[in-house]
Image (tube, grey):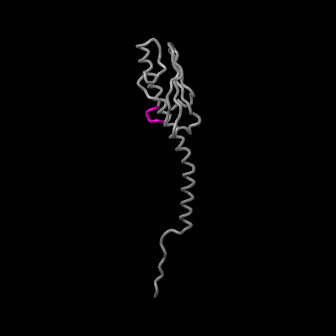
Amino acid sequence: MAELRRATGFTLIEVMIVLVVIAILAGLALPSYLDSVQRARRGDGQASLLRLQLEQEKWRANNLAYTSSLSDLGLSDSSADGFYTIAITFAGASGFTATASASGSQSGDVDCQTLTLAHAGANTSTTPTACWRK
């Protein structure tokens, strides 16, 4: 008697179903992942602005006014990880305003394209507020 052998393995239809399921899951997960990456990278800009604030306070302790020069503070115009460009837009005797503008791969973060830290007297404010939340 001849033995009948049963074929083992996956059919083309089964493989195609698996690929469709993977594509659907990737399509749902990728935008959420990219949003999380952008929110995490905002920390780079925030940390740079907070470091700038600390250095401004050190500068002000020894001078009559805050400085408008990043080099006076020993800082560069790029954030630590390079996702933001840092600038001092105003500096005077009673306060300063600094911005972190998204650059490079972070430029796609349209909601938080520019982070601002303004310090006047004893008050410090950050805008946009939603971008500074955890």
- What type of secondary structure mainly makes up the magenta span? loop
> Where in the figure is residue 13, as x and y percent of width and height?
57, 67
Q: Position of residue 131 (x, y in %)?
A: 55, 31
What residue occupies the far right of the structure in this picture? 111
Magenta part of the chain: 78-82
Residue, x 48% and y 70% (percent of image)?
9
Residue 47, compared with residue 120, is above or below; it is below
Q: Residue at x 53, y 31 (%)?
A: 101
| In the depicted structure, whether residue 9 falls above or below residue 72 | below
Q: Quadrant of residue 51?
A: top left
Does 114 appear in magenta?
no
In this rendered view, identify the residue nearer to me: 114 or 23: 114
Q: How many marks?
A: 0
| Coordinates of residue 69 in the picture (x, y in percent) | 47, 22
Give residue 39's position: percent from left, percent from top. Answer: 52, 37
- Residue farthest bottom in this picture: 1
79 drawn magenta: yes
Q: Is residue 32 above or below residue 17?
A: above
Q: Residue at x 53, y 20 (%)?
A: 90
Where residue 58 sits, quadrant-wise, is top left
